[in-house]
């Protein structure tokens, strides 16, 4: 933990994260965040220009800005709000947060508070909203984003990953904005997420208890991770709606929130990238590969790849190369090594099903990593499968193959003979049996037809 | 402020290049004579100074015994390897065996390790950069062929240290090339990097998403490059000369070197002009003392026929790389050419035909790698870095098992960094140490793979056989360098690891070399081409070839 706090201060990412918070003041917040993000873009753009090298010098700039600009404007309100939300969690943990809590409540009432309201006052509103927008409950964890809840829940259950992830996203927003092209799907997801968030806030109380069970559902929902990244910016929108009614609610809820916050406060760090890292590093041995990459177990190869790229952007050791804190760097290294390991297994058509079976089975705890044993079992399984398909016994295999060619030629009786012979070598071979049954059926039908003719 | 600049170095087999990022753009640095490609040749002069670069290259003939070139072919190799045997037959300098099967170069009475030789080239690159910038440089990214194994990478890194450089990253050359072409901004693209250098051929397939470079596969042929093209021309010239004069120029290293230079020039001329006039005056004298010249004309067509099979071989390697990435040539979105020989029309046409695509142009193929290295160096120094390289290990990591076989630990083309563990157990009661040999290569036979080293673990608890379990962790880091560590599975106690066989240098060796390197003065300015006391009139006298 000690590392995490330090990092935020010293690390590159800090500026983006840090900047938003201060700006968070209700009125300004919206604008500033956007600006900050854009600034980040520009820097990236410049860098890239460098990368572009000779040919691409001009290109980078034009390219980067355009995407950002278009994207930003529409969401602008949202991002602004979004930004505030993330800060929300931080409040609890850091000094700034401390100030926040106090400020938080009061602001909501104010007009500007609207954006704010959601974050800080969010809990109160949700109740009202919830009823109308019920669906939100589970997604809530994401929305709850207020660091406190999440962290707590997260720890126990799936939600945790998000907190961890969220920090990473923090940088990403800048990066993400342009990403539009790659992440079309994300945009889609986000929309749905938002509604849930509002309700979520109301939910917070229950979240803690559910923590453990939560995990399982999560994975299917996998989106959480992806959503989170996007989700953050999204969150703001809901707030504007509720400004009026919320004030009163806030009051009631406020008490509830504080208690929760303290709990999570300790671990809360996740909102910063570094914190997310610490969070992930701590749980490295309790997350399965899907959770680590933040994908559902049903994720397609493309989704796995996208998730891996996303995690690479957040945790690649190169990003922290300029830092001097060796302990922190080795932590990054450990986390990233596991990320590549996850990708290595999940991208593989053979290993992945085996791994999935392992982690969803009773032995999950011991099979979170695809170890040597799993590797061997996979190899054996592949071999066996091949054997089942064409046969283990060379003689049987040969007979089976001739039978198949006979079958193709239409010599049913020859095929049946061959298959019967093959079965004498391998009486248990399901494939042989199946084929034989098929051939015999056709033989029978054929003979019936003939019999009819003759009569 | 010396810390805020990092250089990128393309340490090539025949030529090296150094580059920095200035105002966001990579710039290849010239030396005081304006040359940007520096021959990777180290010539030890009589006065104790060392000459590196294109001027040193001229000494290959006249100071053959004290001029070392193509050191990259030998770096990180065992003395018993085929590559070293081959080099011993060809190289005019003395290659001797050092301790632990290592390779040493003997220059006069002094023995040099390969990293020390390469360090001198790096020292020159560093000096060029320092002269250009007017301040000291201590950080660098150095490129190596994607196909380099752990020994070679480690040795290259050692060379950097010896030259007084903090090697931030050992970068794969194809990856550097892709960086230089500015990929990484767009939506996913698959890029093939066709790198035909002086001594080696590599092809890599990269998938480049936004800010992430993933090497899908790499394949290569370490015995295929521009030098082989030169060899074909040399063979043709020598055979021709033999037929006409019954003198075999290959009998003399001096003639051979002249032939080689002529062949290299002819290759370049053929590529540029479609035909080459070859003239080597006074190449030798026959038994009667008559001085002979070598004259020939090489046409494009002749040349193409000479090297067609070499070019075809590159595409076998391309097939391999594509297959390994599970792609076909049609799936590749762009092709990048790297290396001087890719300027040859025959190479360009063949590449175009194979990939059905126009190769990218715009950056000098000799410099593209150095520029990419500079960009990577810049990115590593930059707190706001947004580009990350997800690289893969090019070779399968294996451990030796009984009967001279090996078992896979980490497959090739696995993204790095990664670690993998394997559990070993003792085979005797009371066993105190466990020894494992680590290999890299694609064969399951140990003798067909490259041995990285032999690791010995001790310090675990002693017990009955099969009872003590030792978990050995193999890690490949972002430089592609392998680390091995072991722990007692039950107690979690780390065991001590010693490397009992390795081609690498020990820490004390490196410290000594750093001292030596620091004391070595680089020769500056022109050096008289003829060593003192040598008469230019003494030409090699060749025996007549046996008549047949």
Image (spheres, coloured by chain):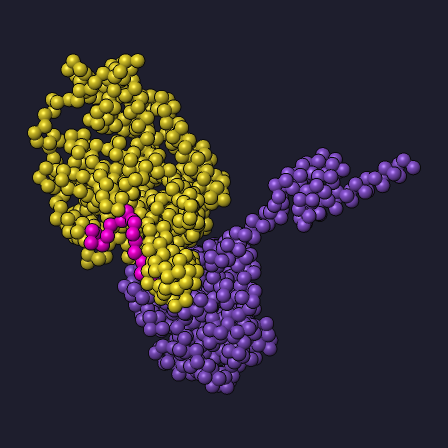
Chain colours: A purple, B yellow
Left-right relation of B239 to B413: left
Residue B473, position as x, y percentages in the image: 39, 58
Q: Residue at 30% of width from left, 68% of height from top?
A: A10
Q: Residue at 13% of width from left, 31% of height from top?
A: B529
Q: Residue furthest left?
A: B533
Residue B498, position as x, y percentages in the image: 30, 56
Q: Residue at 35% of width from left, 34% of height from top?
A: B224
Left-right relation of B534 to B181: left
Answer whether residue A218 is visible to the viewer in this image. yes
Task: Return the residue nearer the eye: A404 or B140.
Answer: A404
Answer whether residue A60 is visible to the viewer in this image. no
Q: Residue at 21% of width from left, 27% of height from top?
A: B253
Residue A112, position as x, y percentages in the image: 44, 76
Range drawn in magenta: B495-510
Q: From the viewer's perspective, is residue B90 above or below residue B443? A: above
The quadrant holding residue B273 is top left
Q: Residue furthest right?
A: A455
Q: Is residue B506 magenta?
A: yes
The quadrant holding residue A309 is bottom left
Task: Return the residue nearer the eye: A227 or B193.
Answer: B193
Q: Is residue B259 magenta?
A: no
The quadrant holding residue A356 is bottom right
Q: From the viewer's perspective, is residue A89 above or below residue B64? A: below
Left-right relation of B72 to A376: left
Residue A419, position as x, y percentages in the image: 71, 42
């Amino acid at each position: 933990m000690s590392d995490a706090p330090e990092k935020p201060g010293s690390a590159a990412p800090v500026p983006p994260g840090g900047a938003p918070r201060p700006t968070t003041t209700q009125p300004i917040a919206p604008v500033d965040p956007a600006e900050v993000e854009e600034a980040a873009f520009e820097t990236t753009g410049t860098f890239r220009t460098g990368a572009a090298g000779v040919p691409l010098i001009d290109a980078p700039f034009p390219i980067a800005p355009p995407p950002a600009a278009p994207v930003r404007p529409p969401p602008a309100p949202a991002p602004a709000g979004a930004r505030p939300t993330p800060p929300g969690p931080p409040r609890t943990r850091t000094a700034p947060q401390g100030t926040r809590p106090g400020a938080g409540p009061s602001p909501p009432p104010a007009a500007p508070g609207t954006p704010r309201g959601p974050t800080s006052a969010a809990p109160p509103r949700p109740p009202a909203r919830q009823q109308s927008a019920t669906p939100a409950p589970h997604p809530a964890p994401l929305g709850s984003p207020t660091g406190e809840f999440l962290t707590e829940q997260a720890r126990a259950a799936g939600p945790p990953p998000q907190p961890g992830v969220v920090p990473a996203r923090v940088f990403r927003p800048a990066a993400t904005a342009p990403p539009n092209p790659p992440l079309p799907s994300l945009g889609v997801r986000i929309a749905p997420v938002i509604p849930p968030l509002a309700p979520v806030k109301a939910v917070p109380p229950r979240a803690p208890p559910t923590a453990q069970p939560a995990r399982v559902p999560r994975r299917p929902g996998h989106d959480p991770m992806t959503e989170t990244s996007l989700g953050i910016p999204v969150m703001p929108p809901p707030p504007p709606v509720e400004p009026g009614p919320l004030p009163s609610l806030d009051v009631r809820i406020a008490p509830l929130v504080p208690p929760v916050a303290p709990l999570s406060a300790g671990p809360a760090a996740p909102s910063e990238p570094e914190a997310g890292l610490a969070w992930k590093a701590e749980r490295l041995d309790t997350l399965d590969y899907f959770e680590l990459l933040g994908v559902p177990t049903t994720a397609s190869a493309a989704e796995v790849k996208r998730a891996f790229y996303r995690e690479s952007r957040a945790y690649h050791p190169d990003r922290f190369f300029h830092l001097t804190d060796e302990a922190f760097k080795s932590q990054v290294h450990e986390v990233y090594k596991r990320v590549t390991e996850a990708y290595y297994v999940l991208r593989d058509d053979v290993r992945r099903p085996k791994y999935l079976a392992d982690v969803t089975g009773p032995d999950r705890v011991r099979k979170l990593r695809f170890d040597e044993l799993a590797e061997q079992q996979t190899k054996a399984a592949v071999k066996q499968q091949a054997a089942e398909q064409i046969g283990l016994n060379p003689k049987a295999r040969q007979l089976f193959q001739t039978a198949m060619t006979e079958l193709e030629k239409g010599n049913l009786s020859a095929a049946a003979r061959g298959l019967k012979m093959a079965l004498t070598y391998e009486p248990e071979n399901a494939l042989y049996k199946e084929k034989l049954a098929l051939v015999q059926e056709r033989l029978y039908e054929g003979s019936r037809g003939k019999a009819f003719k003759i009569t | 402020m010396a810390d805020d600049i990092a250089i990128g170095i393309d340490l090539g087999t025949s030529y090296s290049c150094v580059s920095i990022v200035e105002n966001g753009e990579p710039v290849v640095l010239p030396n005081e004579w304006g040359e940007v490609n520096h021959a990777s040749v180290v010539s030890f002069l009589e006065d104790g100074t060392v000459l590196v670069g294109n001027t040193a290259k001229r000494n290959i003939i006249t100071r053959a015994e004290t001029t070392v070139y193509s050191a990259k072919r030998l770096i990180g190799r065992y003395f018993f390897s085929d590559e070293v045997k081959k080099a011993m037959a060809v190289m005019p300098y003395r290659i001797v065996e050092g301790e632990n099967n290592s390779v040493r170069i003997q220059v006069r009475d002094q023995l040099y390790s390969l990293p020390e030789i390469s360090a001198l080239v790096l020292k020159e690159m560093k000096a060029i950069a320092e002269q250009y910038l007017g301040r000291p440089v201590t950080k660098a990214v150095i490129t190596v062929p994607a196909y380099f194994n752990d020994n070679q990478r480690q040795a290259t890194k050692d060379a950097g240290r010896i030259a007084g450089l903090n090697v931030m990253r050992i970068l794969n050359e194809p990856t550097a090339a892709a960086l230089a072409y500015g990929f990484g901004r767009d939506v996913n693209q698959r890029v093939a990097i066709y790198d035909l250098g002086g001594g080696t051929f590599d092809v890599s397939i990269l998938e480049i998403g936004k800010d992430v470079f993933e090497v899908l596969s790499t394949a290569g042929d370490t015995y295929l490059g521009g030098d082989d093209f030169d060899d074909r021309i040399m063979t043709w010239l020598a055979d021709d000369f033999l037929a006409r004069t019954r003198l075999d120029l290959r009998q003399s290293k001096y003639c051979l070197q002249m032939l080689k230079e002529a062949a290299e020039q002819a290759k370049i001329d053929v590529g540029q002009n479609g035909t080459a006039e070859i003239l080597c005056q006074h190449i030798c004298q026959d038994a009667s003392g008559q001085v002979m010249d070598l004259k020939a004309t090489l046409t494009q067509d002749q040349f193409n026929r000479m090297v067609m099979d070499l070019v075809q071989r590159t595409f076998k390697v391309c097939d391999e790389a594509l297959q390994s990435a599970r792609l076909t040539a049609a799936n590749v979105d762009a092709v990048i050419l790297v290396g001087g020989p890719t300027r040859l029309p025959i190479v360009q046409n063949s590449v175009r035909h194979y990939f059905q695509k126009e190769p990218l142009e715009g950056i000098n193929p000799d410099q593209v790698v150095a520029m990419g290295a500079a960009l990577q160096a810049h990115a590593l120094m930059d707190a706001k870095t947004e580009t990350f390289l997800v690289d893969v290990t090019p070779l399968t990591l294996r451990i030796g098992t009984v009967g001279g076989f090996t078992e896979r630990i980490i497959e090739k083309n696995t993204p790095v960094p990664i670690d993998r563990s394997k559990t070993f157990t003792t085979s005797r009661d009371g066993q105190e140490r466990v020894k494992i040999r680590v290999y890299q290569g694609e064969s399951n036979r140990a003798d067909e793979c490259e041995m990285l080293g032999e690791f010995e673990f001790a310090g675990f608890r002693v017990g009955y056989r099969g009872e003590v379990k030792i978990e050995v962790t193999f890690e490949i880091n972002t430089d592609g360098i392998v680390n091995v560590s072991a722990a007692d599975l039950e107690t979690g106690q780390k065991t001590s690891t010693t490397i009992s066989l390795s081609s690498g240098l020990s820490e004390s060796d490196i410290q000594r070399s750093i001292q030596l390197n620091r004391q070595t003065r680089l020769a500056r300015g022109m050096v008289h081409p003829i060593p003192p006391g040598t008469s230019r009139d003494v030409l090699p006298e060749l025996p007549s070839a046996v008549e047949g």
